[in-house]
Image (spheres, rainbow, N blue to C red):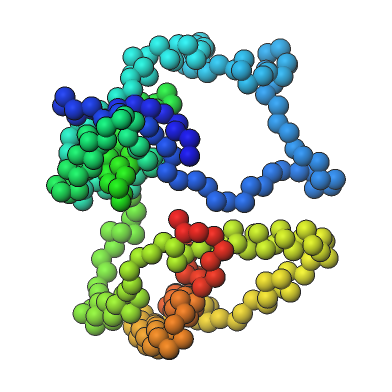
Amino acid sequence: MRAIWKGAIAFGLVNVPVKVYAATEDHDVSLHQVHEKDGGRIRYQRRCEVCGEVVEYKDIAKAYDDGEQTVVLTDEDLASLPVEKSREIDVVEFVPSEQVDPILFNKTYYLEPDSKSTKSYVLLRRTLEDTERTAIVQFSLRQKSRLGALRVRGDVLTLQTLLWEDEVREASFPSLDERVRISAKELEMSSALVDSFSSDFNPAEFTDDYQEQLKTLIEAKLEKGEALDTEETFGAESEDEGGKVLDLMEALRRSVEKNRGKKSGGATSGGSGSRSSSRKDDDEEAGGKKPAARKTAAKTKKGA
């Protein structure tokens, strides 16, 4: 990994020099646009609407238009802002970790100690672990003031940028104001269904089915070209009962029974694939909806 930024965590008189690394990456298959007729690549040009010239990226500046005037802001202008010059990750407060709403989490970075002595780094990490607190910080990165959360993941400190409060939309839906009566039996059956799905979360057990199927499609088209038979490649679509409308209690009861049966059967076969199939069937039967992600037995990529 290559460090994208260097700075220092500052809280009180304690200073912890760190290097910042992107903690995540995109695993999607890279696609580009072509002319369908002849396969030629589609290229985009940055063309000035005043003089008509194609402009090199190095000659492009940012600007603000208030409707009457345009103010051009060069890289030098932006770099002159006091907050942009700061290399400090300034700790504002330490808060109970459960108070940080996950909806605020944005991008995650790893922090590596950037000094000969790692004592202050380890001390901060241990303190966060022992107090079960999250450090709320402010810093500047890539011409933006950021709010962030310092957390611990294994032996490394992570910096997660947080959305600002006004960047989170309010969930205001009239349907949520509707009075709904939930019977004790329905709640009991729903809890039983949750219990039948209970497991310990292991992200390595999940795969991105779309990307795996896309790779299969690309490999098949490279081999067979336009003669590709998608049914032969992926198999025929199976008939399911997703279209059936079931009474809620009946859907819950049948889902619990089916999932328990699948899990007891899977105990002898020992495969996570059978548990995946059970979950897929249950979701389709209960409401005709397929789950957003499912566990698969075959893992061609490493876990997230």
**Residue 136, visible in the rendered structure:** no
Instruction: Answer left or right for 47 relative to 260.
Output: right
Instruction: Answer left or right for 213 relative to 5.
Output: right
Residue under the point 23% across and 27% down: 15
Q: Position of residue 289 (x, y in %)?
A: 48, 70
Q: Which quadrant would residue 149 be assigned to in this image?
A: top left
Q: Position of residue 53 (x, y in %)?
A: 73, 16
Decide: is 289 above or below 49.
below
Residue under the point 67% across and 19% down: 56
Q: What is the tally of numbered marks visible in this picture?
A: 0
Residue under the point 58% across and 51% down: 28
**Residue 71, visible in the rendered structure:** yes
- Looking at this view, name the residue that lies furthest to the front: 116
In what quadrant of the picture does the C terminus appear? bottom left
Q: Position of residue 126 (x, y in %)?
A: 19, 45
Residue under the point 30% across and 42% down: 157
Q: Nearer the viewer, residue 239 or 229?
A: 229
Decide: is 127 above or below 79.
below
- Looking at this view, name the residue that lies furthest to the right: 38
Q: Nearer the viewer, residue 276 or 52?
A: 276
Decide: is 110 above or below 142.
below
